[in-house]
C-alpha cells in the first residue's frame, strides 16, 4: 500500500514538474561534459542573453493562456529597438523611452481591438501585423542601420549593459517582471479571469467577466513587454539593423510551449515559461560551449519542442500514441 | 484594353460551364468567389497606372512569379480545410532547393527525386506527429520550421550553393508553346487541386474532417490517413516550389524561403479559406495567389519601395478578415 502511494506521488510529481526535472537533468549533463559551463560567469551570461526573450515570453504566456497568439512580437521588437536607438540622439533617452512605450502600446491596442472586441482570429491579425510593422520599421529608417553616436557617455546604457550588485540589469528586470507576472496570474482576480476566459470564453461571459476586455489587455501587456525588451535590446546593442527581432516570435512561442502552456488556452504558468526560456538559453549556450556551430541549436530546439509536448501528452492520456 | 482584361481572367471562367443550371452564371460565380472581384479590381487599377502592366509578357511574368508561393498555397488549402496549419513550408522549400543544387553531381534526375522525397519526408514526419502522436499541428510545424532550417544550414554549412548543370537551369527557363513550362505545371496543379477537392472522395473527406472531426471519425473516414496524406502532399508541393526556384536561379541559399509561409497563408486566407476548417477552395486560393502576385508586380512597376509593399500586404490581410467577419455572415 505504502509503495503504491509512493509510486503515485512520483508519477504526479513527474506529471506536474516534468519540465523542471528535465531542466535539472539537462544542466547536469552539460556540466559533466564542459568545465566552463557551470561557472557563475557563464550562468549570468546565459541569463543576460535570455532576458529579452524571457520578458517577451512571460507576456506571451498571458496571451496564450487567453487562447490567442501574438506573432507580431518579433517585428515589434525590431520597430521599438530601431525607434529607441534612432530617437536616443534626437530627443534624449527619456523622451525616446516614452515614445517607444507609446508606440508599443498603440500597436497592442490595435491588436487587442481587432482580436478582443472584433473577435478576429489572432493568428491572422498578428500574422498581418508582422509585415506591417516590418514595413513601418523599414520606412522609418529608410533601410539604413541606426546607431547611438556616443554609447559610453549616456546613462541609457544601464538597461542593457549595467550591473547591480554583480547581477546584470536585464536579468533583474526579467526576473522582477516574471515575479510580478507570476503573482498577478496566480494571486489576483485578473489572473483568475484570464484563466476563465482562456478556458471557455462563452462560459466566462455568462459568469459576468468582460472577456473582450481581458483579451484586449493581454495584447496590451504583450506589446508593453515587447517594448521593454526593445529598450533593453537598444541599450545593449546601441546600433541596430532593421530586422533585429526577425524570428523572435518563434523562439518566444517555443519557450512558452516548452513550459507546458496549452495552446488551446486556459492553462499555463509563468514559472514554467521561465524554465522553458532557460532551457532554450542553456541548450544554445551548451551547444556552443561543446563546439557545435550555432545552427545546430535549431535542430535541438525542434527535438526538444516535439519531445516535451509528446511526453506531456503521453503522461496526461496514459499511453504513448493517440 | 477591355478585351485584354477579360482575356486575362479567362481561366477563372472555365468552371462556370460546369453549372449550366444557374441563370446568371457570372454573377453567381462572383457571389461565391468574391476574391475575383479584387483580382479584376487590381488588374484594372494597375493597368491604368502603368502602361507596362497589361501586356502578355507581364501577365505571364506574374504567373511565373506567383507559381512558387502558388504550389505551396494549393497544398496549404487542403491542410487548412482540414483545420490544420503548416508553418514549415518555407524551410521545406529551402531544403529541397539546396538538395537539388547540392546533389547535381550525382545526376539531375537523382537530385530532383531525392529533393522531392526529402520534402515528402518532412511532410510525412509532420503528419505522423499530428495524427499518431496527437500534437497540435501549429506546434509540430513550428518545431519543423525551426528544425528543418537547421538541417538546411547543417547541409550547406552556411554557404550558398551554385549549380553547375545548365540543363537544370534551362528546364526552368523552357517554354511549352507560348507559356513557360513552370506556369503550365502551376496551372495544371491548380486545376488538379480543385478537381480532386470537388470530385473525389479525398476532397469530400477533407471538408468532412475540417467541418466536424468526431463526425468524420464516426462516419468511418480514415481521418488519420487522410491528414497524413495532406501533409505529404504539402511537403511535395513545397519541394516542387523549391526545385522550381532553384532552377530559375540555378543556385540556392540557406536562408531561402524565410517568411514564405506568411505569404502562403495570406494567399489562402485571401481566398476565403477558414482557419477553423471545413471551408475553402483551391480556385479561390488561386485568386488569392494572383492578388499577391499582381500587387507585388504592379507596385514594382510603379516604383513603390519594397517596404510599402510589405505594409500594404499586411494591411490587406487584416482588412480582408475584418470585412469577412463584419459582413461575411450576411450570406
Image: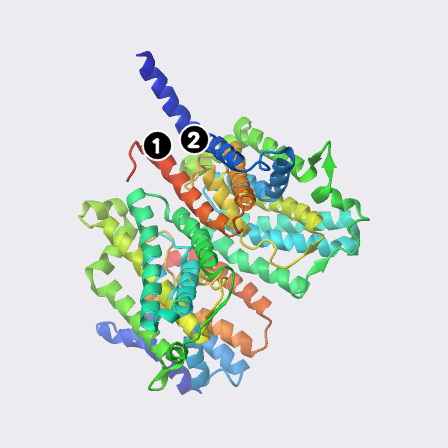
Kindly identify which numbered label has been placed on residue A315: 1
| Residue B191, horizontal then vertical, whole percent | 29, 71
Q: Label 2: which residue?
A: A18
Whichever of callouts 2 and 1 sits on the residue coming sooner in the sequence is 2
Q: Quadrant of residue B271?
A: bottom left
**Circle 1 residues within 10 Å: few <14, some 14–19, many ≥20:** some
Compared across the picture, whether A71 is left or right of A141 comes to: left
Instruction: For mark 1, name the chain.
Output: A
Q: Quadrant of residue B20?
A: bottom left
| Location of the C terminus of chain A (image quadrant) | top left
Q: Which residue is pictured at 54% across the width and 29% down the height? A: A189
Compared across the picture, whether A292 is left or right of A40 comes to: left
Instruction: For mark 2, name the chain.
Output: A
Name the residue at the right extreme: A153
Kindly check if marks 2 and 1 are in contact, taking CB atoms under 8 A apart as contact.
yes
Q: Tell me whether marks 2 and 1 sit on the same chain.
A: yes
Kindly identify which numbered label has been placed on residue B275: none
| Residue B199, horizontal then vertical, whole percent | 21, 65
Amino acid at each position: 500500500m505504502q509503495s503504491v502511494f509512493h509510486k503515485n506521488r512520483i508519477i504526479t510529481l513527474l506529471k506536474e514538474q516534468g519540465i523542471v526535472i528535465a531542466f535539472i537533468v539537462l544542466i547536469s549533463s552539460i556540466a559533466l561534459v564542459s568545465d566552463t559551463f557551470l561557472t557563475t560567469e557563464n550562468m549570468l551570461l546565459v541569463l543576460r542573453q535570455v532576458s529579452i526573450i524571457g520578458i517577451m515570453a512571460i507576456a506571451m504566456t498571458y496571451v496564450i493562456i487567453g487562447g490567442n497568439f501574438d506573432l507580431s512580437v518579433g517585428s515589434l521588437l525590431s520597430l521599438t529597438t530601431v525607434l529607441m536607438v534612432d530617437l536616443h540622439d534626437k530627443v534624449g533617452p527619456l523622451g525616446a523611452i516614452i515614445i517607444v512605450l507609446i508606440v508599443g502600446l498603440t500597436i497592442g491596442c490595435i491588436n487587442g481591438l481587432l482580436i478582443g472586441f472584433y473577435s478576429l482570429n489572432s493568428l491572422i491579425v498578428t500574422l498581418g501585423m508582422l509585415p506591417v510593422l516590418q514595413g513601418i520599421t523599414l520606412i522609418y529608417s529608410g533601410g539604413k542601420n541606426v546607431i547611438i553616436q556616443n554609447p559610453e557617455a549616456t546613462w541609457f546604457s544601464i538597461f542593457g549593459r549595467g550591473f547591480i550588485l554583480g547581477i546584470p540589469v536585464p536579468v533583474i528586470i526579467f526576473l522582477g517582471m516574471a515575479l510580478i507576472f507570476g503573482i498577478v496570474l496566480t494571486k489576483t482576480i485578473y489572473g483568475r479571469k484570464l484563466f476563465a476566459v482562456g478556458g471557455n470564453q462563452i462560459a466566462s461571459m455568462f459568469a459576468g467577466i468582460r472577456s473582450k476586455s481581458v483579451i484586449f489587455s493581454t495584447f496590451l501587456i504583450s506589446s508593453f513587454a515587447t517594448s521593454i525588451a526593445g529598450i533593453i535590446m537598444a541599450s545593449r546593442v546601441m546600433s541596430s539593423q532593421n530586422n533585429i527581432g526577425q524570428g523572435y516570435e518563434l523562439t518566444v512561442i517555443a519557450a512558452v510551449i516548452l513550459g507546458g502552456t496549452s495552446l488551446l488556452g486556459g492553462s499555463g504558468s509563468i514559472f514554467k515559461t521561465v524554465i522553458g526560456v532557460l532551457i532554450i538559453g542553456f541548450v544554445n549556450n551548451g551547444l556552443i560551449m561543446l563546439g557545435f556551430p550555432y545552427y545546430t541549436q535549431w535542430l535541438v530546439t525542434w527535438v526538444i519542442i516535439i519531445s516535451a509536448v509528446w511526453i506531456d501528452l503521453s503522461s496526461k492520456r496514459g499511453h504513448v500514441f493517440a | 484594353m477591355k478585351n485584354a482584361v477579360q482575356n486575362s481572367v479567362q481561366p477563372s471562367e472555365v468552371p462556370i460551364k460546369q453549372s449550366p443550371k444557374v441563370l446568371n452564371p457570372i454573377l453567381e460565380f462572383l457571389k461565391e468567389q468574391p476574391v475575383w472581384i479584387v483580382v479584376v479590381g487590381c488588374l484594372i487599377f494597375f493597368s491604368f497606372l502603368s502602361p507596362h502592366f497589361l501586356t502578355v509578357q507581364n501577365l505571364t511574368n506574374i504567373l511565373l512569379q506567383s507559381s512558387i508561393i502558388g504550389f505551396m498555397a494549393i497544398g496549404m488549402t487542403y491542410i487548412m480545410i482540414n483545420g490544420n496549419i503548416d508553418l514549415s513550408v518555407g524551410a521545406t522549400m529551402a531544403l529541397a532547393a539546396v538538395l537539388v543544387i547540392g546533389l547535381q553531381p550525382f545526376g539531375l534526375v537523382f537530385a530532383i527525386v531525392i529533393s522531392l522525397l526529402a520534402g515528402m519526408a518532412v511532410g510525412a514526419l509532420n503528419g505522423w506527429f499530428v495524427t499518431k502522436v496527437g500534437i497540435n499541428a501549429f506546434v509540430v510545424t513550428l518545431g519543423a520550421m525551426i528544425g528543418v532550417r537547421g538541417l538546411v544550414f547543417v547541409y550547406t554549412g552556411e554557404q550558398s550553393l551554385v549549380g553547375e548543370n545548365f540543363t537544370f537551369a534551362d528546364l526552368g527557363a523552357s517554354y511549352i508553346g507560348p507559356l513557360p513550362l513552370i506556369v503550365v505545371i502551376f496551372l495544371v496543379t491548380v486545376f488538379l487541386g480543385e478537381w480532386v477537392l470537388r470530385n473525389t472522395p479525398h476532397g469530400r473527406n477533407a471538408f468532412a474532417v475540417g467541418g466536424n472531426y468526431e463526425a468524420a471519425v464516426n462516419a468511418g473516414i480514415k481521418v488519420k490517413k487522410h491528414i497524413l496524406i495532406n501533409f505529404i502532399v504539402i511537403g511535395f508541393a513545397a519541394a516542387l516550389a523549391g526545385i522550381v526556384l532553384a532552377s530559375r536561379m540555378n543556385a540556392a541559399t540557406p536562408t531561402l524561403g524565410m517568411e514564405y509561409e506568411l505569404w502562403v497563408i495570406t494567399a489562402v486566407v485571401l481566398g476565403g479559406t477558414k482557419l477553423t476548417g471545413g471551408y475553402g477552395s483551391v480556385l479561390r486560393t488561386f485568386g488569392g495567389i494572383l492578388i499577391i502576385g499582381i500587387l507585388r508586380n504592379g507596385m514594382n512597376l510603379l516604383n513603390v519601395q519594397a517596404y510599402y509593399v510589405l505594409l500594404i500586404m499586411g494591411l490587406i490581410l487584416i482588412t480582408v478578415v475584418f470585412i469577412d467577419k463584419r459582413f461575411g455572415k450576411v450570406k
